[in-house]
Image (cartoon, helix red, strand yellow):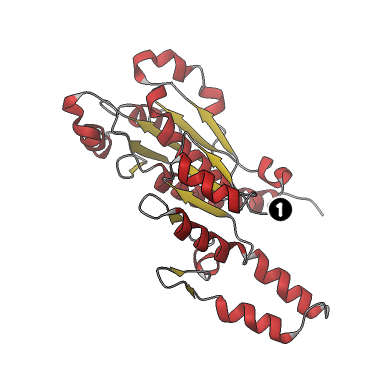
Amino acid sequence: MERLIEILHAYKKGATDLDQVLDFLRRLPFENLGFARVDHHRPLRRGYPEVVYGEDKDASQILHILQAMAATGTPLLVTRVHEEKAAQICAAMPDMQYEPKARVLYKKGPISEHAVAQRLPVQVLSAGSSDIPVAEEAAVTAEVLGQKVQRFYDVGVAGLHRLLHLLDELSKAAVYVVVAGMEGALPSVVAGLVKRPVIAVPTSIGYGASFRGLAPLLGMLNSCAPGVAVVNIDNGFGAGYLASMIADMANAWKHEDSAGSGTS
């Protein structure tokens, strides 16, 4: 989106010619790389660029996709990438960053730190420290998509006072991503304390009867607290993406309220 606006402004000012604009627009719907069709049009349709799932792609494939996307000036995000593969990609694209705990490769967009700081935050909570990798996938996803993110980790129900200590901070969020394994109780508790949406993320952390995340998934789906939406097991990315969409709406309303309350 930013690159399209930039090139149209440049054409208006005479800093680029029509052929360059048309060349950019020809590639805008999608770019066929043979093994992948990169959806350059997605920021215009969805507000966010395409995200690459990296687990079953080799480094060369990911690199070709990222290079095609980088030409349009969008933020870049690749999920589920192990360190060796990430190192190969970062060697070819030094502006990429890698978060090993989340297994995420990324490059943020041009949004200013000041603009991000003014936003209502996405708050990411984890029940235990073993849930942090999934929580970090959610947190980094939201940050790459332009959100202000606050992290509160290891605040599960086994020590409820740790969560209650955060009540003042929790009142300031646009939306919550709550990550938990074992029995998955934390999202219900959070939803009973706050007035914004809660996105629950079950993790595969737990002993045998947790069934690799099925027990917390079912527990979250059966939450008695209203206002809880549930994503798939270990799907930090999906939670971070959805949280970003909700935060964008909350921050738009905040901006409209601020503008409407001004005096003339």
Q: Does any portion of residue 79 appear in the rendered image?
A: yes
Q: Quadrant of residue 230?
A: top left
Q: Quadrant of residue 150?
A: top right
Which quarter shows the N terminus? Answer: bottom right
Q: Residue at x 72, y 76 (%)?
A: 8
The residue to which callout 1 is attached is 259
Instruction: Please tell me whether residue 148 is drawn above or below residue 170 in the rendered image.
Output: below
Q: Residue at x 69, y 48 (%)?
A: 258
Tell me where residue 171 appears, x and y as whole percent.
54, 30
> Is residue 73 found left or right of 220 in the rendered image?
right
Q: Nearer the viewer, residue 21 or 232?
A: 21
Q: Residue at x 38, y 33 (%)?
A: 179
Instruction: Please tell me whether residue 35 is drawn above or below residue 185 in the rendered image.
Output: below
Tell me where residue 221 appears, x and y as whole percent.
25, 40
Tell me where residue 236 appears, x and y as whole percent.
41, 41
Q: Does any portion of residue 49 appear in the rendered image?
A: no
Q: Residue at x 55, y 51 (%)?
A: 248
Q: Residue furthest bottom?
A: 19
Q: Secondary structure at mark 1?
A: helix
Tell me where residue 145 appears, x and y as whole percent.
56, 51
Name the residue type under label 1: Ala
